[in-house]
């Protein structure tokens, strides 16, 4: 770690920010769920839990430990973290199983809407002398029939060289390494940024206790987050990883897919690396 950030991103602070963002999103897109659907899903969830208790002869001490931990998850504000790390990848898999275009993956808890607008070629907001390897991320947005999508929108956000996200860690500018790029008339974009670092999810709260108790690791591989959209087409939410990077093969969030692994090459005649990745969007 460098000395740019002197205070760590705590589970409580990250959890509070993620919870508030989720609540705001939920208020904006509130939807009723049919009673029959709730009955079916909750009944099957409870039945599966009952089966686990019976098969593994769960004791009262283990039950009380679980009960205490579940209470603590809520008090720590870590439900968004827990659900996004261990469950979201399966929800995403089911939601996008019929998609013909680019592969999606989890959104995670660190998305913030409304990032600064940038032209088709632009540099993400960052601090002077932002640490990290410069990265040129470029590509084209097309429809499934190959048509370039004029004015497609590419939202991008990612961690810094220390593994921290703006608005979820102290001492970072509000929109650091976050931007919304509008592609050109041919659906092309060129984004200048720095390569993110792998990072541990916060381990000082309830999720960290679970990880320690189970003997797991807490690491996510370095990745770029993206939301790509265009009129008349389905939005895709995805993450892109780096070939050979740490934890690409054992991501704690189980979100890595082979199609989402980048292989950057050195910039010809310059510093840093570059990579091209095209997005293909399904029609609505």
Image: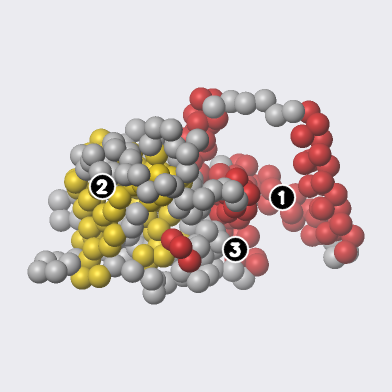
The residue under the point 23% across, 41% down is: 184
Instruction: Between residue 41 and residue 149, name the one nearer to us.
Output: 149
The residue tagged with tag 2: helix, strand or loop? strand
Q: Quadrant of residue 176?
A: top left
Where residue 114 appears, x then y in whole percent?
Answer: 34, 33
Where residue 120 appears, x then y in whole percent?
Answer: 22, 43
The residue tagged with tag 1: helix, strand or loop? helix
Disc with the residue nearer the chain's start (1 vs 2): 1
Between the C-alphas of marks 1 and 2, the distance is 51 Å
| Mark number displayed over residue 188 | 2
Between the C-alphas of marks 1 and 3, the distance is 16 Å
Q: Which residue is under mark 3? A: 211
Disc with the residue nearer the chain's start (3 vs 2): 2
Colouring style: secondary structure
Image quadrant where one finds the N terminus: bottom left
Q: Residue furthest bottom?
A: 244
Query: Would you call the spot at circle 2 few (<14 residues within 10 Å), some (14-19), or many (20 or more)?
Result: many
Q: Is residue 195 visible?
A: yes
Q: Is residue 11 visible?
A: no
In the figure, 245 relative to 152: above or below?
A: below
Q: Residue furthest left?
A: 269
Query: Would you call the spot at circle 1 few (<14 residues within 10 Å), some (14-19), or many (20 or more)?
Result: few
Query: Would you call the spot at circle 3 few (<14 residues within 10 Å), some (14-19), or many (20 or more)?
Result: some
Between the C-alphas of marks 3 and 2, the distance is 41 Å
Disc with the residue nearer the chain's start (1 vs 3): 1
The residue under the point 90% across, 60% down is: 54
The residue tagged with tag 3: helix, strand or loop? helix
The residue under the point 68% across, 51% down is: 69
| Mark number displayed over residue 68 | 1
Where residue 156 appears, x then y in whole percent?
Answer: 34, 46
Where residue 160 appears, x then y in whole percent?
Answer: 31, 56
- Left or right side of 151 for 37: right
């Amino acid at each position: 770690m460098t000395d740019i950030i002197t205070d760590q991103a705590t589970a409580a602070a990250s959890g509070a920010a993620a919870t508030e963002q989720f609540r705001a999103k939920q208020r904006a897109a509130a939807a009723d769920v049919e009673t029959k659907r709730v009955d079916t899903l909750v009944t099957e969830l409870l039945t599966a839990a009952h089966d686990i208790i019976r098969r593994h002869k769960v004791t009262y001490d283990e039950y009380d430990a679980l009960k205490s931990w579940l209470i603590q998850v809520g008090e720590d504000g870590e439900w968004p973290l827990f659900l996004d790390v261990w469950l979201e990848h399966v929800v995403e898999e089911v939601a996008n199983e019929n998609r013909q275009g680019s592969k999606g993956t989890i959104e995670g808890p660190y998305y913030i809407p409304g990032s600064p607008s940038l032209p088709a070629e632009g540099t993400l907001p960052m601090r002077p002398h932002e640490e990290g390897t410069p990265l040129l991320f470029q590509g084209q947005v097309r429809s499934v029939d190959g048509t370039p999508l004029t004015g497609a929108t590419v939202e991008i956000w990612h961690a810094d060289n220390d593994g921290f996200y703006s608005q979820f860690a102290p001492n970072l500018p509000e929109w650091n390494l976050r931007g919304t790029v509008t592609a050109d008339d041919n659906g092309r974009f060129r984004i200048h940024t720095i390569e993110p670092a792998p990072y541990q999810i916060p381990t000082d709260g309830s999720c960290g206790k679970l990880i320690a108790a189970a003997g797991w690791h807490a690491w996510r591989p370095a990745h770029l987050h993206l939301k790509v959209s265009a009129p008349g087409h389905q939005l895709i939410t995805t993450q892109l990883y780096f070939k050979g990077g740490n934890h690409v093969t054992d991501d704690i969030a189980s979100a890595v897919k082979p199609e989402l692994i980048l292989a950057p090459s050195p910039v010809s005649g310059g510093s840093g690396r570059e990579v091209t990745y095209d997005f293909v969007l399904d029609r609505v």
